[in-house]
Image: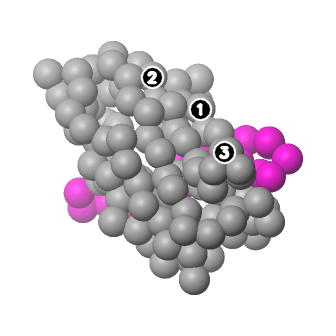
């Protein structure tokens, strides 16, 4: 079972940027899709972005043009570059991987990393 550890969250002002990282305990090179999810208080977890092993990416409408997902299979790490952050981006962010581009989540969830956007 792959273990995931997310990092890079924090408190940032609206309009600011953060770069999240997700380190996997095992190789992700054979994992078709890797994704970033988020869960805000009182809301369901939602897929924010996903990327395939071939580099194809998809994004939730709410983050298109602001977030960029990438993966480094040599480092078993997935990144989420978040720019122009808004208060509604405040949530705990998680990563996961799997065979389904629409919902890559085959492994146990990690602890997540808190992102708070506030002035």
Q: Where is residue 49 in the image (x, y as percent from the top left)?
A: 59, 46
Instruction: State whether residue 27 appears in this view.
Output: yes
Q: Is residue 36 magenta?
A: no
Q: Image point 77% across, 51% down: which residue?
A: 52
In the figure, is residue 31 to the left or right of 49? Answer: right
Using the image, tell me which numbered label, if any, was put on residue 71: 3
Name the secondary structure under disc 1. strand
What residue is shown at x 68% (from left), y 65% (from top)? 27
Q: Nearer the viewer, mark 2 or mark 3?
A: 3
Task: Locate residue 89 relative to residue 68 in the image: left or right.
Answer: left
Q: In which quarter of the image is the C terminus?
A: top left
Q: Residue 45 carries which label?
A: none
Q: In which quarter of the image is the N terminus?
A: bottom right
C-alpha distance separating marks 2 and 3: 18 Å
Gap between marks 3 and 1, in whole Å?
Answer: 10 Å
- Percent across and percent down for residue 41 are 23, 57
What residue is pinned by disc 1? 68
Q: Residue furthest right?
A: 54
**Residue 100 is at least partly visible in this image:** no
Which residue is at 51% across, 56% downward? 23
Left or right position of 29 against 93: right
Element carrying mark 2: loop
Q: Which of marks 2 and 3 is nearer the N terminus?
A: 3
94 or 63: which is nearer to us?
A: 94
- In the foreground, 101 or 107: 107
Q: Name the residue under label 2.
A: 83
In the image, the segment drawn in magenta is 41-60
Position in image of residue 117 (x %, y %): 24, 31
- Looking at the image, the residue that sits furthest to the bottom is 1
**43 is within the stretch colored magenta:** yes
Where is 64 relative to 34, above or below?
A: above
Q: Residue 82's spot in the image, x, y percent?
A: 46, 30
């Amino acid at each position: 079972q792959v273990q995931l550890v997310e990092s890079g969250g924090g408190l940032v002002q609206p309009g600011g940027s953060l770069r999240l990282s997700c380190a996997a305990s095992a190789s992700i090179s054979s994992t078709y899709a890797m994704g970033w999810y988020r869960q805000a208080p009182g809301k369901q977890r939602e897929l924010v972005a996903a990327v395939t092993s071939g580099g194809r990416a998809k994004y939730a409408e709410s983050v298109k043009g602001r977030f960029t997902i990438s993966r480094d299979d040599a480092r078993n790490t997935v990144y989420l570059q978040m720019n122009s952050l808004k208060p509604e981006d405040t949530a705990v962010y998680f990563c996961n991987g799997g065979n389904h581009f629409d919902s890559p989540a085959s492994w146990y969830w990690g602890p997540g990393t808190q992102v708070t956007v506030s002035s």
